[in-house]
Amino acid sequence: MPEATVAIVGAGVAGAAAAIRLAERGVQVDLYEAVPEPRPIGAGLLLQPTGQRVLAAMGLLDEALALGTRVDRLFGDTPSGRAVLDMSYRRFHPEAYGLGIQRGALMGLLWKRLRELGVRWHCGVAVEGFEPDEAGVTLRLPGGGAARHAALILANGSFSRLREGMKVRQRAQAFPWGAVWTVLPAPPGFPQIELRQRFQSAAKMIGLMPVGKVRHDDAEHGINLFWSLPVADLDGWHERIGLSRLKQQMADLFPDVAPLLAGLHEAAQLREARYADVWMSRWHDGRVLAIGDCAHGMSPQLGQGANMALIDAHELAAEVGGDWPRVFERYSRRRRAHLRFYGQASKGLTPMFQSHAVVAPWLRDRFFGWGGRLPYIHQQSIATLAGVKTGWLWGRLKL
Ligand SMILES: Cc1cc2nc3c(=O)[nH]c(=O)nc-3n(C[C@H](O)[C@H](O)[C@H](O)COP(=O)(O)OP(=O)(O)OC[C@H]3O[C@@H](n4cnc5c(N)ncnc54)[C@H](O)[C@@H]3O)c2cc1C
């Protein structure tokens, strides 16, 4: 394999987008993916205006809009009808909106672009380790094979073991809560323009989001259904809780979900999601760089993970030129403020939505809805959601 090429490990949103943006800048890329035949699956994603801008730069936004659904508002309340979240993108910018899209639809678009660009893609190759030196990086491949590259980009998700090979202070903490989720056909008349959540303390949460179709010829638009569960209850939930009891719990919390649940027939339709908080003191180590969830995994509460992955790819390509260690160092500096802000915001906010805490959700219910009606607080909240903030008081991401 030519030594001038850059290896990217992981063909999720981060790895695929980075391969595209680098190939567009004329970089030779080898993309390694552990899964033998990647399929268009995965949870519904809310792509923020920042992530949409990256898709536009790749020439993929129009198609993404045709597949996904425009989300204008986020609304969350308690069973007693107290509004906890009520955010409208229009108050951030008159033309702003979120894009509800199935991960499978997004991956389909990214993979198509990879093929058009002729990126070399090695599927079914789980990279086992790497050894960096002055001149390049040697990858250890299954079966005792090796591959030599000029630089290595780790984009293999929150639970990456390869990340530990970087000489950088790091922490990856599995989050104690996860979720089950599925995409169900939208019943006639089901609301299509808002992300809807209902909370009972922080121990129960249901989320519904319109996410459009995976393929243009799919007959039905989908609604992503998200049900929060502690990780301890996630393992073997179908034996212990069972589908009909789970559906009953969902309908008890949010009766409006009943027509949607008619499309949920078997436990296998529900997929499990686990996540981890990943912190790194910096994201580069010589010729090795971590991006996406591998670099800054967080809970999905702020709806930023895929968005961040797209921004990482875009910002990395903007720094291409010269030696890879310098490129990666400049990238790390460029991303610092934005990634630090969202890491802190996610850590601070997640216990208010997924935990056994009592005080945090009580404060949330009392003050979020009220605070959100104040123009300044609403502006800050919606700018956070839109993915543009680089500091608590000021600072905006310029893409
Ligand atoms: C329920 C849920 C809801 C979410 N909602 C949103 C949302 O609304 N908005 C949003 O922006 N984000 C959301 N996210 C987060 C988003 O899905 C992730 O942040 C994003 O997909 C991360 O992409 P990634 O490419 O960094 O990692 P991943 O998607 O984890 O991809 C890593 C890839 O690396 C491969 N791999 C692993 N190890 C190896 C190896 N050794 N060799 C080769 N390949 C390897 C894996 O097979 C995988 O394909 C959500 C996540 C969940 C779980």
Image: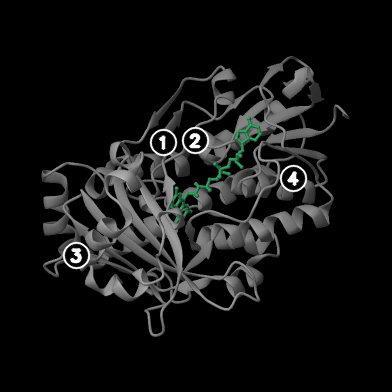
Q: Nearer the viewer, mark 1 or mark 4?
A: 1
Give the amino acid type for the residue marked by disc 3 in the picture. Asp
Q: Can residue 158 be seen in this view?
A: yes
Instruction: Specify few, some or many for label 4: CA neighbours under 10 Å numbering under 14, 14-19, or 20 or more.
Output: many
Judged from the image, the secondary structure of the residue bearing numbered disc 2 is loop
Q: Looking at the image, which residue is at 83% across and 46% down?
A: 26
Quadrant for the C terminus in the image: bottom right
Q: What residue did someone put label 4 on?
A: 22
Q: Can residue 141 be seen in this view?
A: no
Give the amino acid type for the residue marked by disc 1 in the picture. Ala
Q: What residue did someone put label 1 on?
A: 276
- Can you tell me whether the CB of the residue at mark 2 lies under 8 Å from the nearest atom of ligand 1? yes
Q: What residue did someone put label 3 on?
A: 252
Q: Earlier in the sequence, mark 2 or mark 1?
A: 2
Closest to the observer, 259 or 388: 259
323 above or below 263?
above
- Can you tell me whether the CB of the residue at mark 3 lies under 8 Å from the nearest atom of ligand 1? no
Judged from the image, the secondary structure of the residue bearing numbered disc 1 is strand
Is mark 3 in CB contact (under 8 Å) with mark 1?
no
